[in-house]
Image: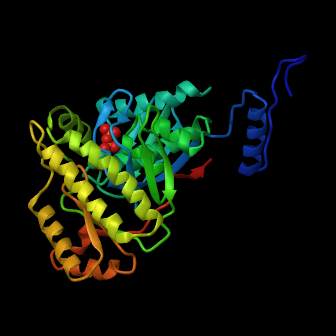
Amino acid sequence: MTGGGRGGCVIALCQNEKSKDEVIKRWKDENLWVLDLNLHKITARAHANIALVKYWGKQDEKNVIPYNSSLSLTLDHLYTDTTIETANKDEFILNGIKQEEAESEKVFKFIDRFRELSERKNKIRISSFNNFPTAAGLASSASGFAALATAANRYFNINLPRKELSVITRFGSGSATRSLFGGFVVWQKGEIPYAFEYDSADWDIAMIVVMISKEVKKVSSKEAMRRTVDSSPYYPAWVESAQSDIESIKRAIKRHDFVTVGEITERSALRMHASMMAAKPPVLYWQPDTIKVLQQVESLRSEGFECYATMDAGPNVKILTRKSQVQTIFEKMSKEINKDNMIICLPGEGATIIDEN
Ligand code: DP6
């Protein structure tokens, strides 16, 4: 203990993380100001997620308020690891390359939200690694901002539960809110949108990611959304159909009705793309191989396989299928697509701290 009378502070030396967390919790419950001195380096991992009912369009861009709720599946094999450590100046390193100010600006604006909530105001170095191509429609911004939010939540000693963390995470990227959770996840629209796990997806579900192009996309999803909202005559129809799709897919998930989940998944992607193709100027992410894979999926279905396609803001296709059929479908797909360009995924877990010292 330091100081005297009614002031001063207590410094507690804790034997392990568990006791430290408990001490912090009890003090915070007493409304005491608590600073965790021990955290200098935190690493978090968050997995990518693929929306089955897509998020497409913001009512309020500044406050990242979506027009429609969305629902996704978190994937085990695609992830971002992000380390935050104390530094002399703010720095952002992505896949080993130091980012220029323009690229770092959005990241540190996001970090400032955590600094504002924290007693810690110091500078940090952020190092982020994706184990898959960045910005090619493989949801790197989702896993990226979810990993960053999870690491910052700990580093800045804020320790919000995931649902509350999702409220801040949306300022990085709307889809990132869903990567905080595992399994099937909803991002619920509303005045204060938030994400939550809807179902653990612990049933016969798998996904194959088919990489058609690893190039960075020319039109960002943010810009494509804005264009669609502002100029596509099909946008109101999109919002209406997304809303009814969310309700139907939730019911289908609860009764493990794979066919309905698959049908909604495929039509949600096609309707989203139809709405952006009708924008002015139009947004067309597809490449010839996108259509080839879509047709292959359709023909596998006519052979009796359970598989459905979805695409995001890029040319790549993801195939929602059964865990029990995924290997056979992978082999069949490999007649047209190089095996190295396909990744088999199962449902993944929510974002976690993987290292701290
Ligand atoms: C097509 O989450 O990248 O992947 O909120 O502007 O960062 P911002 O958009 P972002 O958009 C994702 C769009 C999508 C569909 C989805 O993941 O729901």
Specify the quarter for ligand 1. Answer: top left
| Residue 151 coordinates in the image, percent (x, y) | 53, 43
Q: Position of residue 22 (x, y in %)?
A: 76, 44
The relative height of residue 27 versus residue 183 in the rendered view (above or below) is above
User: Where is 159 relative to 191, above or below?
Assistant: below
Colouring scheme applied when the structure was drawn = rainbow
Q: Is residue 181 visible?
A: no
Q: In the shown orientation, is residue 60 left or right of residue 225?
A: right
The reply, left or right, for residue 91 in relation to residue 42 is left
| Residue at 45 percent of width and 40 percent of height | 126
**Relative height, residue 320 to residue 159 (above, below):** below
Task: Say whether residue 136 is visible.
Answer: yes
Q: Nearer the viewer, residue 226 or 336?
A: 226
Residue sitting at x 45%, y 37%: 193
Above or below: residue 204 compared with residue 189: below
Q: Position of residue 235 (x, y in %)?
A: 20, 40
Report the front residue among 91 and 188.
188
Quarter assignment of residue 268: bottom left
Residue occupying the point 80% across, 37% down: 12
Q: Quadrant of residue 173?
A: top left
- Left or right: where does residue 65 sit relative to residue 137? right
User: Percent x, y for residue 153?
Assistant: 56, 39
Instruction: From the viewer's perspective, tell me whether residue 191 is left or right of residue 138.
Output: right
Count of picture labels? 0
> Quick one: quadrant of the N terminus?
top right
Instruction: Determine the residue located farthest toward the right in the rendered image.
Output: 5
When asked about the image quadrant of residue 66, the answer is top left
Between 216 and 176, the one nearer to me in the picture? 176
